[in-house]
Amino acid sequence: MLGPLFTYLFPDRKKAEKRALIARLMKATAAEFPLRKRKLLNQQEYEIYQLVRHVYEGQDVLVKTSLTRMVVSADEAKTQALFQCIEHLVFLFVVMDAETHVLACIDFYDPASRKRKDVRLKASIMASLGIDYWVLSSDYLDDLKKVQAKFDFSKVGQATFQNSADEAHSNDFTHAKAQLHERLKDRRNEVRGFGDSSPPGSEFGTSANSFLLPLDER
């Protein structure tokens, strides 16, 4: 109980503990190393990822990306304060074009999650930035059909719309939906959403084009 309080009251001790932990990471043997690798996505997230790639065909899809990688402070005096407000915000999927412009951010949301405030904050920020933000529910297959409809509609103004190609694209999506329904019908009672087992992150590095990058909080 008194350990964390003592560290908070005596920051020099906190810095010393951080240096000691870094030294341990640098010198630890494989058997003693305190970190273990893991998959970026669980099975359900991976299935959604495959559908998102289908919906945003031709675009790159990043997984579990921090908001701090996509924005930069417009007010230098408030940079640190703004960073502290958003450093914990991570999107499940981020869609970007060939020039690395963010086209859309997508999250999967469980109504029982404690992240409701985060979802509202992310929605507000994305709206202000003019970036599409989609929150998929448990019936994410139907949600993704709506996402696809908007994305296909947005492409009309960029190129000539080909009815035959669009019809084939739609049929492919319908087929994928049917397949996933078969795979998922036996797993309806499983816990959905993020397996949020990681501890809070810490500063990891800097970039001239973004905020400080926190260690991914998943």
Image (cartoon, helix red, strand yellow):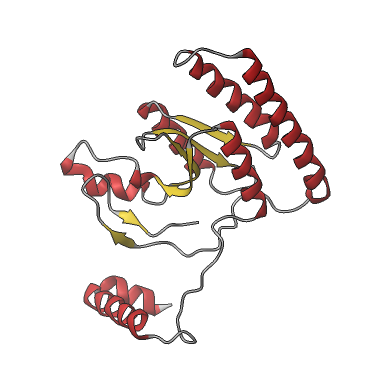
Name the one closer to the observer, 158 or 129.
Answer: 158
Say which quarter of the image contains residue 26: bottom left
Q: Is 39 situated left or right of 188 in this image?
A: left
**Residue 66, above or below 195:** above
State which quarter of the image contains the N terminus.
bottom left
Which residue is depicted at the point 35% across and 62% down? 202
Left or right: where 182 falls relative to 116: right
Residue closer to the observer: 45 or 68:
45
Residue 92 higher or lower than 15, as above or below? above
Foreground of the two, 172 or 122: 172
Residue 137 picture quarter: top right
Q: Position of residue 217 (x, y in %)?
A: 45, 57
Q: What percent of the width, then of the height, locates residue 175?
A: 75, 33
In the rendered view, tell whether residue 165 sits above or below residue 113. Answer: above
Residue at 54 percent across and 57 percent down: it is 40
Position of 102 with respect to 176 (left or right) is: left
Tell me where residue 107 appears, x and y as whole percent.
Answer: 54, 41
Residue at the spot 79% in from the left edge and 47% down from the top edge: 183
Q: Nearer the viewer, residue 109 or 2?
A: 109
Q: Residue at x 63, y 13 (%)?
A: 163
